Image (spheres, coloured by chain):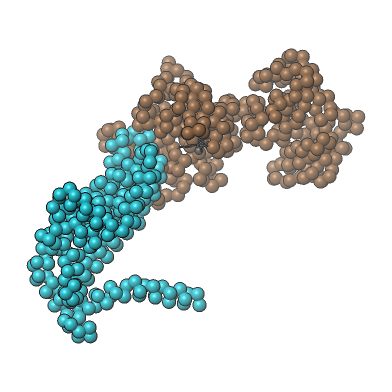
Amino acid sequence: MNRVFKFSFMSVVYSFLYLPMIVLIVYSFNNSTYSLGWKGVTLSWYNELFSDFSLWEVALNSLTVAGISATFATALGSMSAVAFYRYSFRGKDFLYGLIYILIMAPEIVMGISFLILFVSLNIPLGFFTLLLAHITFCLPFVVVTVYSRMTGFDRNIIEAAKDLGASEFECFRLVILPLLMPGVVAGWLLSFTLSMDDVIISFFVTGPEFEILPLKIYSLVRMGVKPEINALCTILFGFTLAVVMIAQMLLKEKK
Amino acid sequence: MLLPMSDTIIELRSVSKSFGSLMALKNVELRVERGKFVTLLGPSGCGKTTLLRLLAGFDTPTSGEIFINGRSMASLPPEKRPVNTVFQSYALFPHMTVFDNVAFGPKLKGLGRKEMERQALEALEMVNLVDLAGRRPNQLSGGQQQRVAIARAVVNKPLVLLLDEPLNALDYKLRKAMQIELKQLQRKLGITFIFVTHDQEEALSMSNQVVVMNHGCIEQVGEPREIYESPRNLFVARFVGEINVLDAEVLSSNGGGVLEVALEGRKMKLHKTSNGHKANGWKAFGPGDRVHVLVRPEDLRVYRREDIEPEDASDFFPATVEEAIYKGATVDLIVSLASGGRLSASQFFNEDDDQLEFYRGEQVFLDWVQGWEVVLPHES
Ligand SMILES: Nc1ncnc2c1ncn2[C@@H]1O[C@H](COP(=O)(O)OP(=O)(O)O)[C@@H](O)[C@H]1O
Ligand SMILES: [Mg+2]
């Protein structure tokens, strides 16, 4: 009885969660332009998608921004996490709290703040401002991912390394970094996906001549959902799924 | 060695360590001789780990100075000190194989590949782990991880090996076996061991020297037997084993060998024995002083009424059996004295007295071998 209940409860929750995605994926293969009725399987929407070069350029823009901002955010975030872990200083808890606040802050607020900042500094909106904003909002996620990975291992390990003759640098290179690597990679992947599909902040901080994928999709959808968009979103979803799975695997093989 | 540089390998001069308002170590003075197996013994929280960490260099003393091999350790970081540590949690590198864990130290010394491998293998052989050299620490049992931690530390041939409660996580049997192995290893290597434990039996059975600690202070330093037989105060007496504490008042002292006391309503003469340690403070007692007379349970002798001559009854302390607990090799008795005080007495089985049956409520008579008691000034 109990098992039946648990099973049905979980099915309801999961269909609620994943039904929209499944509908999207199914429709991306539907051989019909306008109708919602099922007209058989086709790959033509994917074909059209891949032959649309303007879309390719936008996708490349997105990949570039995501790649660069993830890399910067990961480098800065990992170093901050190591500093949080290795050193004790005044106001450490407060500073760590500030990082959490950035994660929780409404994106619309962050977007508008960035806009005001860039405008008041007279920085033209475009690739550069977009990059800065993305680095900023990815950074806290990296700090938290890497830091939680670090707190998972025995603090004595670092002391053991020093005890056995390792200098601060050798200790970092031979012990801390290898142990941290899964967290760093996971942080990068997380940043990459966050950057890839951010709409709200990007909407405020990019200029008209630098288009990125999520904003492009948004503007296309305003003229009606076309089957190509279903296909595009399916690809994006598959991509995110793969990245998240890799990140999970990396974080799981702990110790 | 023809000319030992000095017999003192570790010296602590008035070392203190505070964490905020908490004094974890208070003016600790200690000298350790080269090649000894020294145990730091004390209850949890008394500062044992703190002391080891100061020696290893993970923390710096708030005041005082530490010398190892005649050299001040102030401003010398852990990686430059001639000591190695076996951590309570083992702290093995999880991302390296057993072999790489052990080879970590030699590798950092920049030894050639061959020499490095030779040393690591030698250390692994010493702890019987050559077969598991390719495994990761998480594929080993607790006892095996323990051995890796030991091999990883001794491979560097430190002057001093620090071991922080290394046997705690092991089950009883394994623990006993490792005690013997560690002791043998220490003899073979000739390295000074500073071994931390809160288990008095372990401390007494393994060490050349026991350092008893409490609340950040050293209470007594001595050979195991000295600590057990001549504790300097009630804390040490109680911590290193069960002991009965009787209150007495000094009636007279001849300043030398004999102290007359009133104990449980009896006048009694206590003799200073040839046992040198006991002389400490003995002379300081004068008439009217209150003292504690301490007797270990195994030193108490228990007689039945029919075992003693009725006219000698006044030479014994009458008592009533409250509980008799059969323990295999001994029978442990809880007896209550006329004054209401409770004592515990362990009686060993032997050939001529294999009937050690006592009943609850039975009247018995107690005494102990003269001179085996410990007399301490009264502590409130
Ligand atoms: N890093 C620290 N910060 C604050 N207090 C500490 C720290 N390390 C130890 N202490 C305190 O110092 C005292 C002694 O601790 P410790 O040396 O670990 O005891 P033991 O190893 O004998 O159990 C304890 O009261 C403990 O809480
Ligand atoms: Mg401890």
Give percent across and percent down for residue B123. Answer: 39, 37
Depth check: give the residue in front, A185 or B275.
Answer: A185
Q: Is residue A78 left or right of residue B132?
A: left
Q: Residue at x 59, y 36 (%)?
A: B200
| Colour given to chain A in the rendered image | cyan
Location of residue B201 with respect to A201 vertically, above or below = above
Depth check: give the residue in front, B182 or B235.
Answer: B235
Q: Quadrant of residue A130?
A: bottom left
Q: Is residue B367 left or right of residue B186?
A: right
Q: Residue at x 17, y 60 (%)?
A: A62
In the image, farthest residue toward the front: A120
| Colour given to chain B in the rendered image | brown
Location of residue B110 with respect to A6 vertically, above or below = above
> Is residue A18 in sight in this rendering?
yes
Give percent across and percent down for residue A20. Answer: 29, 74
Q: Residue at x 72, y 34 (%)?
A: B244
Give percent across and percent down for residue B309. Answer: 89, 32
Location of residue A102 with respect to B99 vertically, above or below = below
> Is residue A189 in sight in this rendering?
no
Q: Residue at x 21, y 67 (%)?
A: A236
Depth check: give the residue in front, A36 or B328.
Answer: A36
In the image, farthest residue toward the top: B255
Depth check: give the residue in front, A156 or B162.
Answer: A156
Location of residue A219 with respect to B178 vertically, above or below = below
Q: Split into 4 quadrants, where in the image is the C terminus of chain B?
A: top right
In the image, farthest residue toward the right: B311
Q: Split into 4 quadrants, where in the image is the N terminus of chain B?
A: top left
Q: Is residue B216 left or right of residue A216?
A: right
Give percent across and percent down for residue B14. Answer: 50, 22
Q: How many marks?
A: 0
